[in-house]
Image (cartoon, helix red, strand yellow):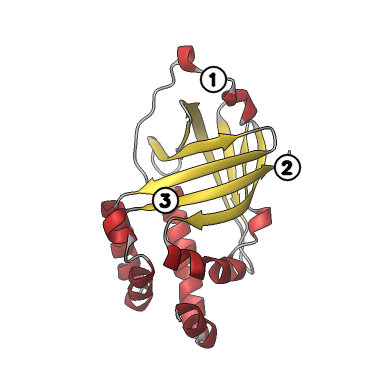
Amino acid sequence: VIGSYIRKNKTMKSKLNYVLIYVLSIIVCFNFVSCDDDDDTKLDYETLIVGKWSVEGISTDNKRLNEALPLVLAQVLDLGSTSITFDSQGNSEIYISLKGKDAIQLKAVYAYLDGQVAFRFDDILPIPLNVFDVSSLTEKDMRLIASFSPEELAIILELVKAEDAEIAQLLETLLSTSLTDGLKITLDMKRIG
């Protein structure tokens, strides 16, 4: 129902694309946590994560949002060209390829510890941001999972409301169960370098 409404309404498509780019940017730069860089607990996975990884898929634990994601992502992102590169010195480059717009390029310091990778964007705020659980990591594949509490989603929704109340209402509908249960976003990645 939501997908057919979006396809019929070009203004809504444009606004939804803008908001989803905005929300994706917030997701990349939101989850405030701290991490410890203790050399005694470094795992072999620290060397395995080094390289360039292409985002092959994005999914959530929210059925309604997952139904809308393919339509929206196909219009907004060049998913296969979206990537994260990790070097062995703890630096990373995040490249988000947007359709019809300039790509978003972010540089971050990262730390891998106990099955989690944390990013710190010094240009934005010099503390660790956005921790992902690394649920699987092999020579070829990696799965990152970001978890957002209902409170964090409410803050994101308020930021969207400040930009566009109509889109916020649509997003609130898509996130209805997540606003009480939280949201997990999964990034499936393949090594490309």
Residue at 34% in and 72% down:
173
What residue is disc 3 on? 184
> CA separation, marks 2 and 3?
25 Å
Numbered mark located on residue 192 in the image: 2
Q: Position of residue 111 (x, y in %)?
A: 49, 29
Q: Position of residue 71 (x, y in %)?
A: 56, 72
Where is residue 192, by image quadrant? top right
Q: Is residue 97 left or right of residue 65?
A: right
The mark lying in front, picked from 2 and 1, is 1
Query: Residue 155, can we see it?
Result: no
Residue 43 disc label = 1
Query: How many numbered callouts?
Result: 3
The answer to whether residue 73 shows anywhere in this view is: yes
The residue lying at 69 percent from left, 37 percent from top is 140
Kind of residue at badge 1 = Leu
**Quarter of the image where one finds residue 1:** bottom left
